[in-house]
Amino acid sequence: MKNEIGENIKALRKMHGMTQGDLALLLGGKKSLVSNYENGYSTPDIFTLIKLADIFDVSLDELVGRK
């Protein structure tokens, strides 16, 4: 299965000039948390998805790749 959420997180993070560590700090977690999202080893829960959408100033639909 394609890891569209993780790919979108990575693209948005890079677009905003952030490292995985920078994003992890904003989420209150460790760098490995962001790495796991981006590599498809885990999926953010809805509360984290909302935080990510706010951080990147995108809708939840855009974040998860919903057309």
Image (cartoon, grey):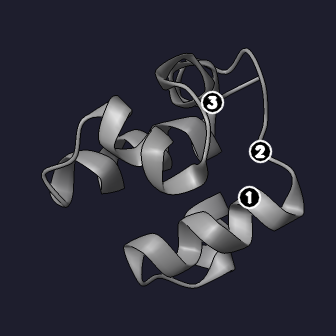
Q: Amino acid at mark 2?
A: Pro
Does the image show residue 18? yes
**Which of 7/22 is in front?**
22
Residue that numbered label 3 is attached to: 37
Name the residue at 47% across, 23% down: 31
**Which of 5/13 is in front?**
13
Image quadrant in which you'd find residue 20: top left
Mark 1 is surrounded, within 10 Å at the Cα level, by few (under 14), some (14 to 19) or many (20 or more) other residues, namely few
Looking at the picture, does residue 52 appear above or below residue 27? below
Please give the label number shown on residue 44: 2
Please give the label number shown on residue 48: 1
Task: Kindly indicate whether the residue at mark 1 contacts the one at mark 2 (C-beta within 8 angstroms).
Answer: yes
Name the residue at 58% across, 52% down: 27
Q: Amino acid at mark 3?
A: Tyr
Mark 3 is surrounded, within 10 Å at the Cα level, by few (under 14), some (14 to 19) or many (20 or more) other residues, namely some
Mark 2 is surrounded, within 10 Å at the Cα level, by few (under 14), some (14 to 19) or many (20 or more) other residues, namely some
Side of 46 relative to 27 (left or right): right
User: Could you tell me residue 52's position as x and y percent?
Assistant: 56, 64
Q: Quadrant of the N terminus?
A: top right
Query: Which type of secondary structure does the marked residue at label 1 adopt?
Result: helix
Name the residue at 62% across, 46% down: 5
Task: Kindly indicate whether the residue at mark 3 contacts the one at mark 1 (C-beta within 8 angstroms).
Answer: no
Q: CA distance from mark 2 to mark 1?
A: 6 Å
Looking at the image, the residue that sits furthest to the left is: 17
Looking at the picture, does residue 40 appear above or below residue 43? above
**Closer to the N terminus: mark 1 or mark 3?**
3
User: Could you tell me residue 47's position as x and y percent?
Assistant: 83, 65
Q: Amino acid at mark 1?
A: Thr
User: Could you tell me residue 29's position as x and y percent?
Assistant: 61, 36
Image quadrant in which you'd find residue 59: bottom right
